[in-house]
Image: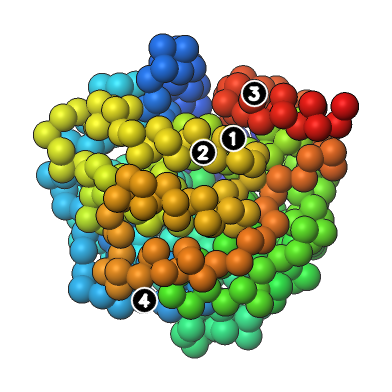
Amino acid sequence: MYLRMAKRLLMETDKRLLWKLAYNFGFKGALSVQRFKRRMKRGVYFPPFLYISVINSCNLRCQGCWVDVSAKQQTIDLTAMNRLIRDSQAAGNSFFGIVGGEPFMHPQLLEIFAQHPGCYFQVFTNGHFITDDVARELRRLGNVTPLISVEGTEIVSDERRGRPAVLSKTMQGVENCLKHKLITGVCTSVCQTNIDDLVREEWVDRLIEMGVLYTWFHVYRPMGPQPNPDLCLTREQQRRIRQFVVDMRARKPIGIVDAYFDGEGQALCPAAAGLTHHINPWGGIEPCPIVQFAKESIHDPRPIDQVISQSEFLRDFRQLAAQTTRGCIVLERPDLLEELVVLHQAGDQTVRKTAQAELQAMLARPSQDAPGDEIPERSWAYRLAKRMFFNDFGVYRDLNRQRQLSKV
């Protein structure tokens, strides 16, 4: 499997793009994690990776979306983005996840990428704005990987995304990326209406045949003003996805991302571990995209690493989350999260200003945490990579100790 994957990388991509991935994301990303671990020992938390919502607008109206996509357009402009990225680089970071809204609706997005050739950007997109010309420019830049969202069959996609003919436009974006040999990924927010269609070996085989190099199955989370809880997965279905990912990783020549488990199959929350935080289009610094509250902003004149590492709200979020569950505190204990927001008087970052009421209305639901029912990685490569670069790095130590004592 590993030889087949290496062959795909060498034969199906532009070699210059592969070098950018290996150096800007792989080598520099590994150094960033090492710096993060050294900072942790001093009690300083600045994430090695940042996710940035560069715009709130979107051409789709997805079920359960928590972003104010219909509100007046707000973007992080070029000047603010340049300062944010350069400050982060000065602290050792080189990788940024770009989200929205629909990022390709940002009028300066390609210019942002062009001004930071030493960084690597992963763009979460519906693919509708990736024309042939855009894909050609992304290949020229070489430091961007598009991660294109596919939500199901034609009928399911139209229902999930609130517009007609969504899938065909998305697949055209995928084809444009592959035509220009971009390192292209496809992701799915897995829910009740698409789990049986896409969490299947046949779908993974189709992606490989198309030329897609990685995929990501993440679990639908019921947030926002219309959370649509009927789409939520059961604990058994979440376990099914985890087992599927572990099995496919050991057998298929395609990268499969997951952000919620370590190599031993124990759940983790990247925000609780301090691995990443989220920046919204107004510049507010949030624990993660679905926690739409903030006390700090990127528009603070201090360097971004100081703004984040000195935030009492982010610190207390990490501690509360790590002491409560290895899974998602938003799903499991929204009441505790609301108490934290009130304690810090953290500002509602939405245009609608109903985020606290939405938290109050949430019912507790299972997340990825399943103590005693872990599914470890079968692939030695994934297990080794996670042990070195993606685990909780000890933040759950007290919670694990409590669980061990409860078994005695």
- Amino acid found under the numbered disc labelled 4: Asn
Q: Which of marks 3 and 4 is in front?
A: 3
> How far apart are labels 2 and 4 at the CA level?
36 Å
Quickly name the residue at label 2.
Answer: 320
**Element class at badge 1:** helix
**Element class at badge 3:** helix
Residue beneath the point at 19% across and 28% down: 303
Residue beneath the point at 48% across and 83% down: 162
**Up-down relation of residue 18 to residue 384 (above or below):** below
Instruction: State the image quarter where residue 159 is shown.
Output: bottom right
Give x and y (percent) for residue 75.
21, 59
Pick whichever of labels 2 and 3 is earlier in the sequence: 2
Quickly name the residue at label 4.
Answer: 59
Q: Residues at badges 1 and 2 in contact (C-beta under 8 Å)? A: yes
Pick whichever of labels 3 and 4 is earlier in the sequence: 4
Query: Where is the N terminus found, in terms of image quarters?
Result: top right
Quickly name the residue at label 3.
Answer: 397
Say left or right for 36 vs 407: left
Q: Which mark is on residue 323?
A: 1
